[in-house]
Every structure is written in C-alpha cells, then in structure tokens.
Amino acid sequence: AKSKGKSAYERFAPEMKEVSHERLQIESRLRRALELDEFDLYFQPIVETASGHLIGAEALIRWNSPTMGLMMPDKFIPLAEETGLIIPIGEWVIRQACAAARQWQETTGLKLSIAVNVSPRQFRDPSFVDAVSRALIEQRLDPVCLELEITERLILDNTIETADILRRLDEMGVRLSVDDFGTGYSALSYLKSYPFDTLKIDKSFIRDVMIEPGDAALVRAIINMAHSLGLQVIAEGVEEEAQTHFLQAHGCDYAQGYFYSRPASADSFVAWIRSNHR
Ligand code: C2E
Ligand code: CA
Ligand code: CA
Ligand code: CA
C-alpha cells in the first residue's frame, strides 16, 4: 500500500505550506501595523430614538495598510483573534476609544459614551480586566461612559470564567452590552444571571422590519423582554427614516445606523456633532 501514490500528508503538504505562508505574511503585517500606527478608529453615532439626541458612539477599527489598502475588520479581526494579536490590538482600541470619548466630552460639554467591541480571546485574556481599568484611569474617563460590547456567542460559550470576568467589569462600573442579539443560540437564561445593561438588536432584524411582519414581531418582543429585565435596547443597522418611527413607536431606547451617519473618522465625527447638536 505504501508504494501506491503519495501519502495524504504529501498530497496536502504543498497546499498547507502555501496557506501557512500567506497567513504568516498577513500576521507579520498585522504585527507591524500596530508598531507603524496603521490602525484607525472610526466612530458611528448612537442616538436616543425618542429625541434624536446623540448619546455616544461605537468605535470601529480600520486598517490602513500601505500594501493592501483600507482593510475592514471582518478581513483581519478573525486572524488577529487566531494569532493572539487581538490582545495588543484590543488594548490599543480601548485606550484610543477612551481618549476619544474624553476629548469629545471636553470639547462639547456632553457626557458622551463610547462603545467598544471585545472579541472572545481578548475577553478571556488574564490581563483584560486590568487593561480596561488602566485605560480608564490613564484617560480619566468615567467608567459609566465606557460600554463593552460582547457577542451573544461568547457569552453562551463559557460559564464560570465568563461570569467572573463580567462581574469584575460590572464592579468597575463600566457598562456591558450584548452585541448581535438574536443571532446566537437564543438561550435567554444568561440575561437574568449576568450584569448586562444593554441589548443590541442585530441589524439582520432591523433590515426588513418594515416589510417582514415576522421581523417586526421579533423586534417588538425583544424590546419588551429587554425592558422587563431592566435592560436598555439599541437597534443597529437603521438605514431608513420609517425604521426610526417604528422603533420610536415601540419604545426602542437607542438607534444606530447609516440613516444617522456612517462610521466616520474622529474629525468627521466631531464635525457631525457640531452640525447636528449645536
Ligand atoms: P458590529 O459590532 O456588529 O458592528 C456594526 C457593523 O455594522 C459595522 O461594520 C458598521 O459599519 C456596520 N453598520 C453600521 N450601520 C449600518 C447600517 O445602517 N447598515 C449596514 N448594513 N451596516 C451598518 P464594520 O465596521 O465593518 O465592523 C464589522 C465587525 O467587525 C463589527 O461588527 C465587529 O464585530 C468587528 N469589529 C469592528 N471593530 C472592532 C474592534 O475594535 N475590535 C473587535 N474585536 N472587533 C471589531
Ligand atoms: Ca458592535
Ligand atoms: Ca452593569
Ligand atoms: Ca452588532
């Protein structure tokens, strides 16, 4: 049998080598990206649905690679997660985000908050809670102005460890939100045992909320359930005015989406505040 053709290893080896070579290349570029300051934070406003008032923004990372152009997070966050680079990158994001929020507060006099995405590996890293605490102290940001967005998937993946980290963050006074709500395994019991403040309804439910009665029913149900549990609700992916009226009518607290603004550079975001809220 040995003499018949190549072994499985030999047949797959060249391909594997290629894949790992490409990955190593992106990985080394990712590593350099942090040193060369190629990352950028974009900000997307979050507004109070009833009044239209700005309450803060979500920070969204971008990578301006001189060789590969503008890279969106879906293209490199998974690799950063696999390689562990998400830990230094994530720390950079939190520090920058806190600094930005603090700066807007000073220039506008509004107590704006900043929401930051946290990926699973970053969340479970033993240094995470301390890194958050350090960023708040260094940037002199009130913890209540920092909201950490954690996906439903992460919450459902783990138990004791997750509960302990969430408890420590809650005690620090930062706000905790469930991101992409409704796309996980819909085991809702975690909502009453963990110290969350906010649910972010996934944009896939908002997209067709005006044309799909099923989506409309789900959005209404999520808002009511969240409020019964003492949680606030943010609808993401709001693109049309009609959707804002629907959300307003059903008591959704906050909204975010292209209807208000696309994610914008720090300068454009400040200009947006000036033109909309002064
Ligand atoms: P997400 O947390 O669900 O962020 C919302 C995404 O929806 C953003 O994509 C945003 O640009 C987009 N979006 C906002 N409004 C609308 C709208 O009205 N319609 C539509 N169709 N899309 C809208 P983006 O910036 O490409 O980010 C993609 C994902 O990458 C994020 O999804 C988040 O999971 C991840 N991500 C972004 N920044 C970071 C970061 O700093 N750290 C980590 N760990 N993940 C990040
Ligand atoms: Ca998010
Ligand atoms: Ca809390
Ligand atoms: Ca989301």
Image (tube, helix red, strand yellow):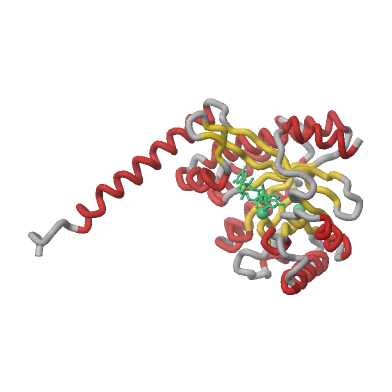
The percent coordinates of residue 69 (x first, y second) are 53, 34
Q: Residue furthest top?
A: 36
The percent coordinates of residue 244 (x first, y second) are 83, 57
Image quarter in which the C terminus is found: top right
In the rendered structure, the answer to whether residue 3 lies left or right of residue 43 reads left
In the rendered structure, the answer to whether residue 33 lies left or right of residue 59 reads left
**Residue at image x 55%, y 39%?**
71
**Residue at image x 86%, y 60%?**
245
In the rendered structure, the answer to whether residue 253 lies left or right of residue 177 reads right
**Residue at image x 51%, y 46%?**
81
| Viewer-proximal residue among 89 and 163 | 89
Q: Examine the rendered structure and indicate whether residue 27 appears above or below residue 208.
A: above
Q: Examine the rendered structure and indicate whether residue 190 appears above or below residue 24.
A: below
Q: Examine the rendered structure and indicate whether residue 15 appears above or below residue 140.
A: below
**Residue at image x 73%, y 61%?**
206
The percent coordinates of residue 170 (x first, y second) are 72, 51
Is residue 157 in view? yes
Q: Residue furthest left?
A: 3
Image quarter in which the N terminus is found: bottom left
| Viewer-proximal residue among 24 and 144 | 24
The percent coordinates of residue 277 (x first, y second) are 89, 38
Is residue 197 in view? no
Numbered marks: total: 0
| Viewer-proximal residue among 37 and 189 | 37
Q: Quadrant of residue 263?
A: top right
